[in-house]
Image (cartoon, helix red, strand yellow):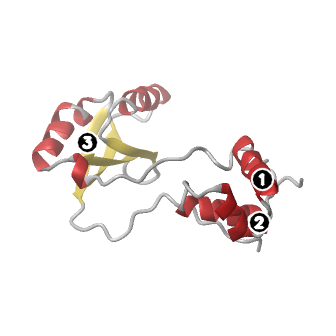
Amino acid sequence: MKKVANGAEEIGKIDRNILRTLQQDGRISYTDLARRVGLSVTPCIERVKRLERNGYILGYSAKVCPTKLEAGLVVFVQIRLNHTSQKNFEEFRRSVIDLENIQSCFLVSGNYDYLLKARVADMAAYRELLGHRILKLPAVQESTSYVVMEELKETMEVPINYKR
């Protein structure tokens, strides 16, 4: 198999169809998956196992309803560290990982250093998270919060394009 720029093996149209289908329905049976992508069952299973082994498939999960689990409020938080030293970045990374209400954390360019996505029950829970946890993380100098008023789209699906 041919390697692409990032060192991964290049995958073809059938593998991309497998990935696209599994992103939409991770519980699909191998029989149904094989039928959808035009393979017999055994080669389909072999391809899925190879995609797992090569790191294209990282795992399988269930989509759950955040509001039913008291996590319906989404807040994006920009974080600026007081000094952009390697030590501060490492301490912040180690600490933010332990915050269960932080769904995502990104190192970003621009006026802030990190962008966090938090899910909480309500504003009271967010004030608690911000004041007692986020602002007490190592080296945090400043934060700006954006409360989501309406969620128009959220997906974990990665765009899977056919070869150009």
Q: Residue at x 20, y 40 (%)?
A: 130
Residue to which mark 3 is pinned: 142
Q: Residues within 10 Å of mark 1 (few under 14, many from 20)?
A: some
Q: Is residue 71 visible?
A: no
Q: At numbered mark 1, what does the secondary structure look like: helix, strand or loop?
A: helix
What residue type is disc 3 on? Glu
Q: At numbered mark 2, what does the secondary structure look like: helix, strand or loop?
A: helix
Q: At numbered mark 3, what does the secondary structure look like: helix, strand or loop?
A: strand
- The mark that comes first in sequence, 3 or 1, is 1
The answer to whether 121 appears left or right of 58 in the picture is: left
* Of 38 and 151, the residue lying toward us: 38
Q: Residue at x 40, y 63 (%)?
A: 154
- The mark that comes first in sequence, 3 or 2, is 2
Q: Is residue 14 visible?
A: yes
Residues under labels 1 and 2: Cα distance?
9 Å
The answer to whether 39 appears left or right of 142 in the picture is: right
Q: Residue at x 65, y 60 (%)?
A: 19
What residue type is disc 1 on? Arg
* Of 104 and 157, the residue lying toward us: 157
What residue type is disc 2 on? Ile
Residues under labels 3 and 2: Cα distance?
48 Å
Residue to which mark 1 is pinned: 47
Residues under labels 3 and 1: Cα distance?
48 Å
Residue 43 lies, with reference to residue 139, above or below; the image says below
Kindly identify which numbered label has been placed on residue 14. Answer: 2
